Image (tube, helix red, strand yellow):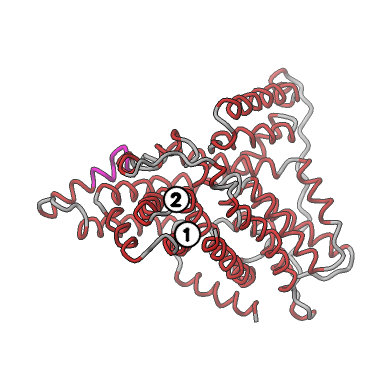
Amino acid sequence: MIARLGSALCRVFEKTAPDPFVIAIALTLLTMLLALTLGYEGAEGVSSKAGAMIDSWRGPKGLWAFLGFGMQMSLILVTGHALAESRPIKSVIHALSSIPNRAPSAAALVSVGAILAGLLNWGLGLIVGALLAREMARALRAKGIRAHGALLAAAGYTGLLVWHGGMSGSSPLVMSNARDMARVLPAELIEQHSITPVPLSDTLFSPMNLFVCLGLLVIVPITFMLLTPKHDDEIVPMPMSDDPEPEPIARATTFPEWIDRSPIVVWALALLLVGAFVRFATIDGFMTLGPNEVNVAMLALGLVFHGSIRSYLNAAEDGAKGCAGIILQFPLYAGIMGIAVSSGLVDDFSTWISSFANETTAPLFTFCSAAVVNLFVPSGGGQWGIQGPIALQTGAESGVAPAKMIMSVAYGDQLTNMLQPFWALPLLAITKVKAREIVGYTCVVMVVAMIWMGIALLVF
């Protein structure tokens, strides 16, 4: 039944959902239409509104407002991917894949590995989950154990179910310090509601987020154990191919080649990065870590694990292929935010939600709306740029602390990744499983996670 549900859902998405870049363009046009019809109160005539709208779209607070933020998100993906491709991480994956002797426990272990890696870095979680799913399928096949490939691949995708509550979560990291906060939120909103940085102790390390993350670390693997097919005719093994081993790096014959391959150079840079990270934590405090500091830590760890500049660059170049969506879509998201703020749409939408929301329901409404927005804007950073101002203003008017509104957006964003195939593309390429084959399983997991996150927003 679950496989049939997955196929049906995928057919719907295949027939109705365009490319995410097309969706970003459509949202831009929709925002412009709403601004012309509902916004810019006091402006005389359509031409006056149109001029103000174009100025806010093309201005410094519009299209190009997220250039720095987009670079931070790209580096999170690249450094996470490069770390996952290092020899020590691959050795851990190989060791884990040899443990299970039954298909249900194998699916559960893949999910545990993906979730733990996803809490550290979403790029790391995505690649580790994919590699672990593939190696688990190979190990089980060698033991003569039949395992459903789509289930293992779905389990490998669950790092994206927890990432926004982890150490690479865009919203909490951006809001932890004034520098990054000012790059994303409009100055008018910060001044109007006296918004100040929110330390990570109130978001990522809050009792509510620990409750959510630790709970999902237990509930999601159990769900995958229960989802494991019991009949042989329901099991489709993961497609396998003997991937060629990467060519060994040739021995250096010139001084430049020696520099590229020397561990001395790697350790020199890594020690400088570690020193910068420690200096920041000592002066500003660990709870104010932002995307820059997370990227410094991931870069240092990746360099040490690879052991040479050449090895790291090869892995980073492979990871950079996944940044196209971020690079092209973030300017459009920034333009949407610029229009929504300057036209008054943010104020109007926040006032409308506040009219029927209260301290209890505002986080739930924000959580549900964020889950829907993520289907159309599959980027946590881009979504925070659009929805963050609305969420914080709604919270201010409903009496909800900024930290809870931040995490409400974060939970909604990560929840519907289980239906959004945009970030699954690297995993699907590694496991050679099709999106329609995993979406039924991830949909069930999404419903379970939604209930758990909803409970957390009500209790805390």
Q: Position of residue 228 (x, y in %)?
A: 74, 73
Q: Nearer the viewer, residue 34 or 389?
A: 389
Query: Is residue 252 placed above or below 86 in the rendered structure?
Result: above
Q: CA distance from mark 1 to mark 2?
A: 23 Å
Determine whether, in the image, residue 296 is placed left or right of residue 382: right
Q: Position of residue 403 (x, y in %)?
A: 48, 49
Q: Position of residue 71 (x, y in %)?
A: 49, 38
Q: Amino acid at mark 2?
A: Ala
Quarter where residue 247 is shown? top right
| Residue 401: mark | 2
| Residue 144: mark | none
Q: Nearer the viewer, residue 459 or 415?
A: 459
Q: Which residues are magenta?
A: 54-62
Quarter where residue 88 is shown? top right
In primary-sequence order, the first of circles 1 and 2 is 1
The residue sitting at 50% across, 60% down in the picture is 412
* Residue 36 counted in the magenta span: no
Q: Give the quadrant of the C terminus.
A: bottom right
Q: Amino acid at mark 1?
A: Asn
Determine whether, in the image, residue 216 is placed left or right of residue 91: left
Query: Closer to us: mark 1 or mark 2?
Result: 2
Q: Give the quadrant of the N terminus.
A: bottom right
Query: Is residue 105 placed above or below 175 in the rendered structure?
Result: below
Classify mark 2: helix, strand or loop.
Answer: loop
Q: Residues within 10 Å of mark 1 (few under 14, many from 20)?
A: many
CB of mark 1 within 8 Å of CB of mark 2? no
Q: Which residue is mark 1?
A: 374
